[in-house]
Image (cartoon, grey):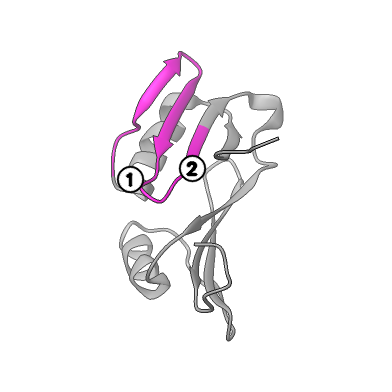
Amino acid sequence: MAINNVLASVAVKNLMAAGEWYREVLGRAPDSMPMHELLEWKFAGGGWLQVYELPERAGHGSFTLAVTDRDEEVRRLTALGIDTRQTTDNPLVKTVMITDPDGNHIAFAQALDASMAR
């Protein structure tokens, strides 16, 4: 079996409200809306993020976004009024963990070691 890509997905209570929040956090509109309950963002390095409406599962998800500069992301997210106090620094990776309005956890991770996923 050959796996060519991965799609991360996260459930939210209200897709339109969540879509506006994710648009701000990701800095752009979604790349597609293949179904009325699903928004998708595609990333240059590969992979997709799917945000879908399913209230009973909302708030129980997590995913990681690979970034080139965690400190820059902290400044940008802080300017949006998002709590960025949950950071970690170690020789392999620097992260900041935030939550979306439904309680899903989002990590922004900067790999410092070449062996880490990017």
Upstream in sequence: badge 2 or badge 1: 1
Circle 1: residue type: Glu
Residue topped by disc 2 = 47
Residue at 58% from the left image edge and 36% from the top image edge: 9
- Judged from the image, the secondary structure of the residue bearing numbered disc 1 is helix
Q: Is residue 29 magenta?
A: yes
Residue at 51% from the left image edge and 33% from the top image edge: 50
Give the Cα separation between the discs numbered 2 and 1: 19 Å
Q: Residue furthest top?
A: 36
Between tags 2 and 1, which lies in front? Answer: 2
Residue 60 location, x and y as percent?
Answer: 70, 42
In this rendering, position of residue 40 left or right of residue 10: left
Residue 96 location, x and y as percent?
Answer: 52, 68
Q: Is residue 69 magenta?
A: no
Residue 117 location, x and y as percent?
Answer: 56, 63
Residue 66 location, x and y as percent?
Answer: 48, 59
- The foreground one among 69 and 3 is 3
Residue at 57% from the left image edge and 32% from the top image edge: 12
In this rendering, position of residue 22 left or right of residue 4: left
On the image, which quarter does residue 43 sit in? top left
In this rendering, position of residue 97 left or right of residue 68: right
Quadrant that contains the N terminus: top right
Residue topped by disc 1 = 24
